[in-house]
């Protein structure tokens, strides 16, 4: 039961990240911060 919980969490987080980077190149610096926070 622990497996299905962590799986859906990283999935939605990975989707909004690439979308923001594609739209705004300035999101690269904050992008690294988001990874470190995660």
Image: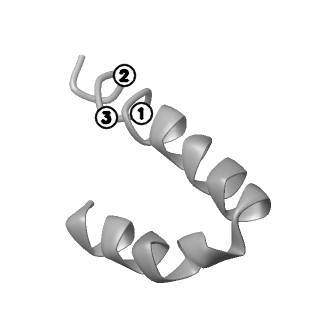
- In depth, the one of 1 and 15 nearer the eye is 15
Q: Is residue 19 above or below residue 11?
A: below
Q: Name the residue under label 3.
A: 6
Task: Tally the marks.
Answer: 3
Q: Give the secondary structure at mark 1.
A: loop
Q: In which quarter of the image is residue 36?
A: bottom left
Q: Name the residue under label 1.
A: 7
Q: Is residue 2 above or below residue 24?
A: above
Q: Residue at x 32, y 75 (%)?
A: 33
- The answer to whether residue 4 is left or right of residue 1 is right
Give the class, few, some or many, for how many residues have Cα within 10 Å of label 3's Cα (few <14, many ≥20).
few
Give the class, few, some or many, for how many residues have Cα within 10 Å of label 1's Cα (few <14, many ≥20).
few
Image quadrant occupied by the C terminus: bottom left
- In depth, the one of 26 and 36 nearer the eye is 26
Q: In which quarter of the image is residue 34?
A: bottom left
Q: Give the secondary structure at mark 3.
A: loop
Q: Are marks 1 and 3 in contact (CB under 8 Å)?
A: yes
Q: Are marks 1 and 2 in contact (CB under 8 Å)?
A: yes
Please provide percent x and percent y for residue 18: 67, 56
Mark number for residue 4?
2
């Amino acid at each position: 039961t622990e497996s299905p919980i962590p799986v859906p969490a990283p999935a939605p987080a990975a989707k909004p990240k690439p979308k923001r980077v594609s739209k705004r190149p300035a999101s690269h610096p904050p992008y690294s911060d988001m990874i470190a926070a995660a």
